[in-house]
Image (cartoon, rainbow, N blue to C red):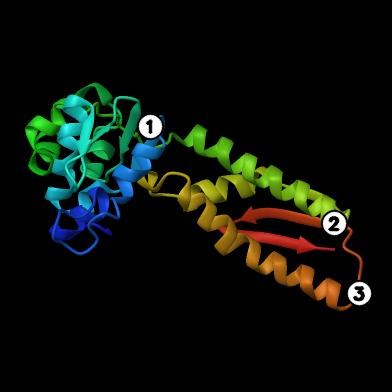
Amino acid sequence: AEYQEKHTVSRLIGSPPGYVGYGEGGILTEAIRKMPYSVVLLDEVEKAHPEVLNIFYQAFDKGELSDGEGRLIDCQNIVFFLTSNLGYQTIVDNAQSPEKLDEALYAELAAFFKPALLARMETVFYLPLARDVLEKIVRGKLSNLEKLFKQRYDAQVVIEDSLIEEILNRANRSENGARMLEAIIEGQLLPPISLSLLNKLANKQPVERIYLAADEGEFIGEVE
């Protein structure tokens, strides 16, 4: 999003002679020059101006970049990762048949990336997480929460499977992956539990047991 305008190319490779910033070098080219064995992550590239992406054709084709001063920067030992939300709905729709994704996505990718640039990239699809994978993530997060409660309050912690099922049921948009799980746990489950714990502490009462479950679509949290 920081590179939506054409002129922002100079921020990456440096300004040419006669322009403001000449001699200061570019953010990208200077970083590669100083650290020639690196991983470069370009996040959400679909938000960038096409001219910004065009500078990578040279890097992907010849393994080098020209900076604003005309110097060649060696990129042969750089691994570039470009992430994008392009075609996410197509990926969701074809998640059960990933072998069809190359053909299904090509038109959408080619509409943004120039074919010559696209041909020099390897496309990796991130498929929606299956329910069993999401369940493992939920169990892991709740296990960490249990350890935290035990360490901080020296209390018995009981977490019922019904809680896990309710969290998974609320995470009903598979394309959001594990982010929604985090939002449900931190934004819906924990606030009332935290309030109960604060009330206990304010009244100088010990916390002996924390019970977490769900019933009829509602979270249940008891602090004793």
- The answer to the question of whether label 2 and label 1 lie on touching residues, with beta carbons closer than 8 A, is no
Give the residue at x 13% y 26%: 119
Question: Looking at the image, is 204 positioned above or below residue 12?
Answer: below
| Camera-nearest residue between 203 and 121 | 121
* Residue to which mark 1 is pinned: 36
Give the residue at x 16% y 42%: 70
| Camera-nearest residue between 119 and 199 | 119
* Residue to which mark 3 is pinned: 204
Left-right relation of 117 to 83? left
Left-right relation of 219 to 196? left
Q: Position of residue 96 (x, y in %)?
A: 30, 28
Mark 2 vs mark 1: in front: 1
Q: Position of residue 53 (x, y in %)?
A: 17, 44
Instruction: Compute the Cα span from label 2 to label 1.
Output: 54 Å
Which mark sits nearer the N-terminus, 2 or 3?
A: 3
Residue type (three-letter) at the residue carrying disc 1? Pro
